[in-house]
Image (cartoon, rainbow, N blue to C red):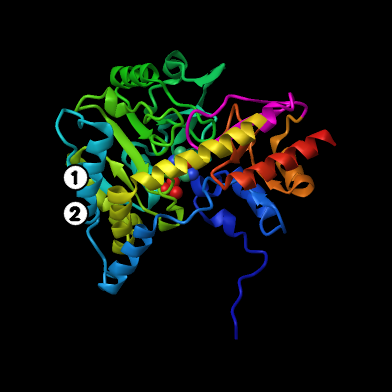
Amino acid sequence: MTIVSSPDRNWLAEIHPTVREAQPSGIVEVFDYGRGRQGLIPLWVGEGDLPPPASVSEAVKASLDRGETFYTAQAGIPPLREAIAAYMTRVYGVAPGGGAFNPESFFVTIGGMHAIEIATRLTLGPGDEALIPSPAWPNFVGAIETSGARAVPVPLGRVGRWSLDPNRLADAVTPATKVIFLNSPANPTGFIATREEIAATLALARERGLWIVADEIYGRLTYDGARAPSFHDVMALDDKILFVQTLSKNWAMTGFRVGWLEAPPALGPVIENLVQFTTSGVPVFTQRAAIAALNDGESFLSSQIERFRRSRDILCDGLAATGRVRFCEPEAAFYLFFQVDGFPDSRALALRLIDEAGVGAAPGSAFGPGGEGHLRICFARDPTQIEEATRRILRWLKK
Ligand code: PMP
């Protein structure tokens, strides 16, 4: 006999309210609505259409052939921690406090999302508050609120470019504030915080004793040839900063689920505990893939940026020519966050674009205050496909 639960059982009443009340991602809702539609061009999630460099997949196969299928070090395998430190020294120059980056500062995670989850556990608990410049990627709010803390959005400014006003951040600080989450370059806006904005945020954090969680995963996906300004450029050794990083975007490795948290080495035992109690570690074969990407991935990264730039220009030029679409041109990352005149309800607009134009975009309402009225399109795809998506939107707008 199969035992089934009663249809009247209210399971949601039985679980903890902090997780029951967490808002679902508004991106997922639209994605579920349009998933599997014939001929639809899916531009709603933050990933491209290319496989990673061949050396990355080969590293996985070689690892499996060597039988690397067992539990492993909670902080990550030493050769990956060393490869991350060498990569960081190459890209960011000196480490906080001077010299080369220390492998002991890097903790391998299941993608950037797991690094965000650990950073949240390290800094926040029930009743605490975290400031988030918004619009922002909804998973920050999700991680914060499922920990029992409260996410406090702080609107980004918008005068020609998106901008971060340190006075607005300062005004939002209360005795319960413990951390500022700053994602720069940002999803969904493509905003890059200037060195001055980063320095002012750090000054505020120092003055008020706050942590900073710096999500700099798009730091190399910029269109002016340089990496984006980083907290690494302005921080001192003792600053309370946790960095989130991932292999997902630079090397087209979203499905590998590997990233890292950078933190003071003295927190190592606590972070290893948190890894143990959440995922119990990252598969060795994906860590081998990460080493390959960090060591040999520069030309792949440059070619991705060139491809994204072409797609960005096609999309921005096409939409700008309509005179009905408003946006700040993205300076980095691979998202266009735009408004269409006369369409204030972004969820309704995203659903109509699926049904009537065959294009999947994420609704701006999913990105918190300041996001409503916008759509986010990920242009990390083949320029010919972005050209076709642009054509479809233009045709739809003309109707
Ligand atoms: N941070 C930001 C700002 C992101 O946009 C994303 C992915 N969309 C992540 C972190 C997480 O990346 P991962 O796939 O490595 O978990």
On whether residue 341 falls in the magenta region, the answer is yes
Q: Residues within 10 Å of mark 1 (few under 14, many from 20)?
A: some
- Name which residue lies at 61% across and 75% down: 4
- Name which residue lies at 41% across and 57% down: 256
Q: Is mark 1 within 8 Å of ligand 1?
A: no
The percent position of residue 339, horizontal first and vertical second, equals 68, 28
The residue wearing badge 2 is 78
Find the residue positioned furthest to the left. Answer: 99
Q: Is residue 372 visible?
A: no
Q: Is residue 290 visible?
A: yes
Task: Point out the stretch of residues depicted in magenta.
Answer: 318-342
Q: Residues within 10 Å of mark 2 (few under 14, many from 20)?
A: few
Asked if marks 2 and 1 touch (Cβ < 8 Å), the reply is yes
The answer to whether 287 is drawn above or below residue 368 in the figure is below
- Name which residue lies at 40% across and 32% down: 128
Element type at marker 1?
Answer: helix
Q: Amino acid at mark 1?
A: Pro
The residue wearing badge 1 is 103
Find the residue positioned furthest to the bottom. Answer: 1
